Image (cartoon, grey):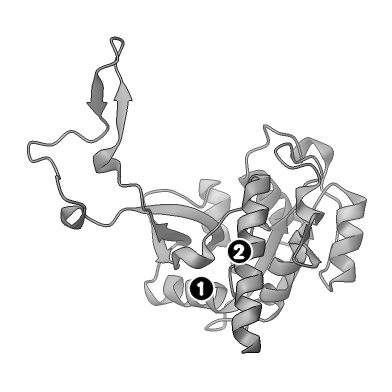
């Protein structure tokens, strides 16, 4: 609990991932991908109940082996390519309705730490926010992004009377890193999203913000984890 408010954390892991088949249980530095999120969530000092939402019995069994509760199997209609990401959250909330805050922890953010999870909750509470999501500074500023017009002319995404010519003059721009979403449960039910004008951002460092979407991401994260272990052993 945090300030006498209960917290439900949901790890979504459907079986039919397309980019990397069976991605959620693919080995990453000696553990299935979902295990990295399960272990960090279990260290949280605020999460009251941690569950996995999946349609896949193999994924469910692996999660149980890592100590994560799987109270139900998600209906197949909520595990399709076109299923909105909020739908499994709403389904879990209907099944387990008694929590004040509901958090979504995607398994594709294996570098996220329990400290990030707890700090995001604290930030949400401290700011009296309805919802809070994790973000990180992007290296690729939209001030230097363009689209191609019909005749291949470069048209800036952001049009301004004063072009930003130097990187150091550009304001910091943030992107969702997909690691942490948290909001008041009643607010989620009403808005059916974690993101609207009332949502605030919680900044995470770039080195913990990699979202695994393709095989190259597994390679990058595995390299980071191996390097971290080497440093810890010195």
Determine the secondary structure under disc 2.
strand
Furthest residue in direction bottom, as rendered: 234
Q: Are marks 2 and 1 in contact (CB under 8 Å)?
A: yes
Depicted 88 relative to depicted 112: above or below: above
Calculate the distance from the C-alpha at mark 2 to the C-alpha at mark 1: 9 Å
Q: Position of residue 115 (x, y in %)?
A: 55, 79
Determine the secondary structure under disc 1.
helix
Query: For this rendering, which residue is in front, 174 or 122?
Result: 174
User: Is residue 116 in sight in this rendering?
Assistant: yes
- Which quarter of the figure has residue 30? bottom right
Q: Which mark is residue 159?
A: none
Question: Which of the two discs, 2 and 1, labels the residue nearer the N terminus?
Answer: 2
Q: In the shown orientation, is residue 62 left or right of residue 231?
A: right
Furthest residue in direction top, as rendered: 151
Depicted 1 relative to depicted 73: above or below: below
| Residue matched to label 2 | 103
Query: For this rendering, which residue is in front, 21 or 62?
Result: 21
Classed neighbour count for the residue bearing mark 2: other residues with Cα under 10 Å, few (<14), some (14–19), many (≥20): many
**Residue depicted at x 35% and y 47%:** 140
Q: Which mark is residue 121?
A: 1
User: Is residue 46 in sight in this rendering?
Assistant: no
Classed neighbour count for the residue bearing mark 1: other residues with Cα under 10 Å, few (<14), some (14–19), many (≥20): many
Q: Position of residue 186 (x, y in %)?
A: 56, 59
**Residue depicted at x 81% and y 69%:** 68
- Which quarter of the figure has residue 41? bottom right
Q: Position of residue 45 (x, y in %)?
A: 62, 84
**Residue depicted at x 22% and y 55%:** 171
Q: Position of residue 63 (x, y in %)?
A: 84, 64
């Amino acid at each position: 609990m945090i300030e006498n408010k209960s917290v439900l954390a949901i790890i979504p892991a459907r079986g039919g991932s397309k980019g990397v088949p069976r991605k959620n249980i693919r080995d990453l530095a000696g553990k299935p991908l979902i295990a990295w999120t399960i272990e960090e969530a279990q260290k949280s000092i605020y999460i009251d109940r941690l569950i996995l939402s999946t349609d896949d019995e193999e994924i469910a069994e692996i999660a149980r082996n890592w100590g994560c509760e799987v109270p139900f199997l998600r209906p197949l209609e909520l595990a399709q390519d076109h299923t909105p990401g909020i739908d499994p959250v709403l389904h879990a909330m209907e099944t387990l309705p008694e929590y004040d805050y509901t958090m979504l922890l995607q398994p594709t953010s294996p570098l996220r730490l329990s400290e990030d999870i707890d700090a995001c909750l604290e930030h949400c509470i401290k700011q009296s926010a309805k919802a809070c999501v994790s973000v990180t500074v992007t290296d690729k500023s939209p001030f230097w992004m363009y689209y191609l017009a019909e005749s291949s002319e470069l048209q800036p995404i952001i049009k301004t009377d004063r072009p930003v010519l130097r990187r150091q003059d550009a304001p910091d721009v943030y992107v969702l890193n997909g690691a942490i979403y948290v909001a008041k449960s009643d607010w989620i039910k009403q808005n059916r999203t974690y993101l609207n004008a009332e949502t605030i951002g919680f900044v995470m460092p770039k080195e913990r913000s990699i979202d695994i979407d393709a095989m190259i991401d597994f390679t990058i994260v595995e390299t980071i984890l191996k390097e971290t272990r080497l440093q810890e052993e010195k």
